[in-house]
Image (cartoon, rainbow, N blue to C red):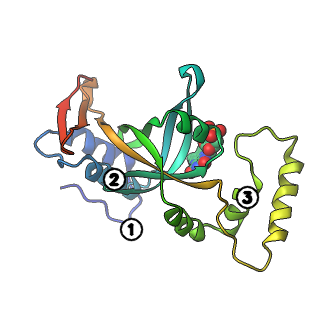
């Protein structure tokens, strides 16, 4: 059993070696890939990885053109992975046309990555409201001021918009803009990749079955 003592600085190369040696076996992994994903996220956090919950999301645009961007994975639950964004952004326009997305969590310090494929669906307005309330005030103002992904004349314009909304909401709570909220990615496939010596890496693929259970198979590295 590997254990990291919180008071000591983590030695990432030691931690990486531990995971490389332990590997991933079909017998030991949980049946539920979201449980394994949460465990890996917790381990990356404990290891001191910078922004362990940053996640790359790929969407498909017109003419099947893919595009990628980093977001922050804010929550995982039994239904999937939740991130927040502007509902009028490029990614949201893509999702409106093709809800299929692919996400990547990468912790190179631990020789690990997770690839998720699934559909992105807006979470409820109530859930988005609840999260928006917890955001810092500056981030709340920014959500109103920034037409994410649109071309803007210059930085001065953006700062003027920020100032306008700061003034508009001065002294009171800031409501969630209707164009801002969360998506939940409901996974259909999740692949866990653990780096091993000699490039003999472990890759376990979970595929969701019609009855909701997960089929686990091994892929060649
Ligand atoms: C580490 C990191 C975290 C980010 N987190 C978010 C996020 O949670 N939500 C978001 O909308 N943009 C986030 N961004 C900005 C996006 O990468 C991207 O620039 C923005 O969402 C616009 O993307 P789009 O034009 O493809 O829609 C983050 C960027 C970085 C580098």
Residue 134 vertical position relative to residue 43 in the rendered view, above or below? below
Name which residue lies at 15% across and 39% down.
Answer: 25
Mark 3–mark 2 Cα distance, whole angstroms, equals 29 Å
Q: Earlier in the sequence, mark 1 or mark 3?
A: 1
Name which residue lies at 83% across and 51% down.
Answer: 158
CB contact under 8 Å: marks 3 and 2: no
Any mark on residue 169, and which?
A: none
Residue 35, horizontal then vertical, whole percent: 26, 53
Regarding ligand 1, which quadrant of the image does it lie in?
top right
Which quadrant holds the N terminus? bottom left
Residue 190, horizontal then vertical, whole percent: 31, 38
Give the class, few, some or many, for how many residues have Cα within 10 Å of label 3's Cα (few <14, many ≥20).
many
The residue where tag 3 is placed is 144
Front residue of this view, candidates 57 and 49:
57
Q: How many marks?
A: 3
CB contact under 8 Å: marks 1 and 3: no
Instruction: Look at the numbered disc 2 and give the secondary structure of its residue.
Output: loop
Front residue of this view, candidates 112 and 159:
159
Residue at mark 3: C-beta within 8 A of ligand 1: no
Residue 144, horizontal then vertical, whole percent: 73, 58
């Amino acid at each position: 059993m590997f254990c990291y003592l919180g008071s000591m600085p983590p030695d990432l190369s030691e931690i990486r070696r531990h995971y490389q040696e332990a590997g991933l076996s079909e017998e030991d992994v949980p049946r539920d890939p979201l449980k394994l994903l949460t465990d890996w996220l917790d381990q990356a956090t404990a290891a001191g990885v910078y922004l362990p919950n940053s996640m790359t999301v790929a969407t498909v645009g017109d003419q099947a053109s893919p595009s990628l961007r980093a977001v922050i994975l804010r929550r995982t639950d039994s239904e999937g992975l939740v991130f927040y964004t502007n509902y009028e952004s490029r990614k949201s326009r893509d999702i409106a046309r093709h809800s299929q997305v692919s996400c990547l969590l990468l912790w190179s310090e631990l020789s690990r990555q997770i690839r998720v494929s699934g559909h992105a669906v807006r979470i409820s307005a109530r859930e988005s409201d609840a999260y928006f309330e917890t955001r810092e005030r500056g981030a709340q103002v920014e959500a109103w001021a920034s037409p994410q992904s649109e071309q803007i004349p210059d930085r001065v314009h953006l700062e003027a918009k920020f100032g306008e909304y700061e003034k508009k909401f001065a002294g009171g709570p800031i409501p969630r803009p209707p164009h801002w909220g969360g998506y939940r990615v409901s996974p259909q496939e999740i692949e866990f990749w653990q780096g091993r010596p000699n490039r003999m890496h472990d890759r376990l693929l979970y595929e969701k079955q019609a009855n909701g259970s997960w089929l686990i198979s091994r892929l060649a590295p």
